[in-house]
């Protein structure tokens, strides 16, 4: 008898950040390996890719959001039913970094979650962030990530630096979070089953007395 291989899980990621920081460039680089110089800034699109993670194959679904829906209900819908969040700012634009805490707050609110949402903080355009053009220091960004208990990485969608690493790190967090959730679910089920069995046992005894 041939066994049907298990369906690989789908991990749903979303790119979050203000306009022009490189959300689309990072996504396209990761999916296809190409660097896009010009990408329609109003375009929100989703991409999928099959990958091999440490704990097996998976399908990655990346939603690349477009900046102009910031702070709207549409943006909230983008965050719903997503497993992991890549928070991207540009190392050459301080305002894009300043927007990060608010965007994370919004994600937590939409998900109605505490602090443990899988997030990676990404400072992009590393290739441009020479001393004269860098506007966000490593220390400052690391401090923010630390306060979230998250990882901070500096990437370049142009050279590809750390692009694969950033997505893999986020996927690792997502996969771990799902494992934790399924374990907690099974423990709860086992607990209910035990309670039910104990309840039945008590009833049996009651019957004997009667
Ligand atoms: N030099 C350089 N340019 C980048 C990088 N990432 C994005 N860009 C450029 O920055 C502009 C905005 O990028 P885009 O991906 O459209 O930003 P989005 O609005 O966040 O999706 C485009 O011209 C990109 O080619 C990077 O890492 N290095
Ligand atoms: Mg874009």
Image (cartoon, rainbow, N blue to C red):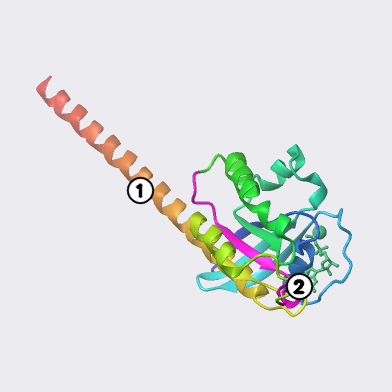
Question: In the rendering, at what x and y percent does residue 180 appear?
Answer: 43, 55
Instruction: Tell me the residue that label 2 is attached to.
Output: 29
Is disc 2 placed on a helix, strand or loop?
Answer: helix
Question: In the rendering, at what x and y percent does residue 149 appear?
Answer: 48, 58
Q: Is mark 1 within 8 Å of ligand 1?
A: no
Q: How many marks?
A: 2
Mark 1, Cα crowd under 10 Å, few <14 / some 14-19 / many 20+, is few
Instruction: Say which of 15 and 99 sits in front.
Output: 99
- Quarter of image, res 43: bottom right
Instruction: Say which of 140 and 193 sits in front.
Output: 140
Q: Residue at x 24, y 32 (%)?
A: 200
Left/right placement of residue 115 relative to residue 166 reads left
Most extreme residue toward the left is 209
Per the rendering, the mark at residue 23 is none
Mark 2, Cα crowd under 10 Å, few <14 / some 14-19 / many 20+, is many
- State which region is magenta: 114-130
Q: Residue at x 29, y 35 (%)?
A: 196
- Quarter of image, res 130: bottom right
Residue 121 magenta-highlighted: yes
Q: Is residue 40 above or below residue 54?
A: above
Q: Which quarter of the figure is the C terminus placed in?
A: top left
Instruction: Tell me the residue that label 1 is attached to.
Output: 187
Question: In the rendering, at what x and y percent does residue 163 appear?
Answer: 67, 73
Is disc 1 placed on a helix, strand or loop?
Answer: helix
């Amino acid at each position: 008898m041939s066994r049907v291989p298990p369906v690989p899980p789908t991990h749903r990621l979303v790119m979050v950040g203000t306009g022009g920081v490189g959300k689309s460039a990072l996504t396209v680089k990761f999916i296809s390996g190409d660097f896009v110089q010009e990408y329609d800034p109003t375009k929100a699109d989703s991409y999928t890719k099959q990958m091999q993670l440490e704990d097996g194959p998976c399908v990655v679904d990346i939603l690349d959001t477009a900046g102009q829906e910031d702070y709207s209900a549409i943006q909230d819908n983008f965050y719903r039913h997503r497993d992991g969040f890549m928070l991207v700012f540009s190392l050459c634009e301080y305002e894009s970094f300043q927007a990060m805490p608010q965007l994370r707050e919004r994600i937590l609110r939409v998900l109605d979650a505490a602090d443990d949402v899988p997030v990676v903080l990404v400072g992009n355009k590393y290739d441009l962030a020479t001393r004269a053009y860098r506007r966000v220091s490593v220390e400052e960004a690391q401090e923010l990530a630390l306060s979230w208990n998250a990882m901070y990485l500096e990437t370049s969608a142009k050279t590809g630096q750390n692009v694969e690493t950033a997505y893999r790190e986020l996927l690792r967090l997502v996969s771990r979070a799902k494992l934790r959730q399924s374990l907690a679910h099974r423990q709860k089920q086992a607990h209910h089953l035990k309670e039910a069995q104990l309840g039945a046992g008590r009833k049996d005894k009651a019957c004997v007395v009667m």
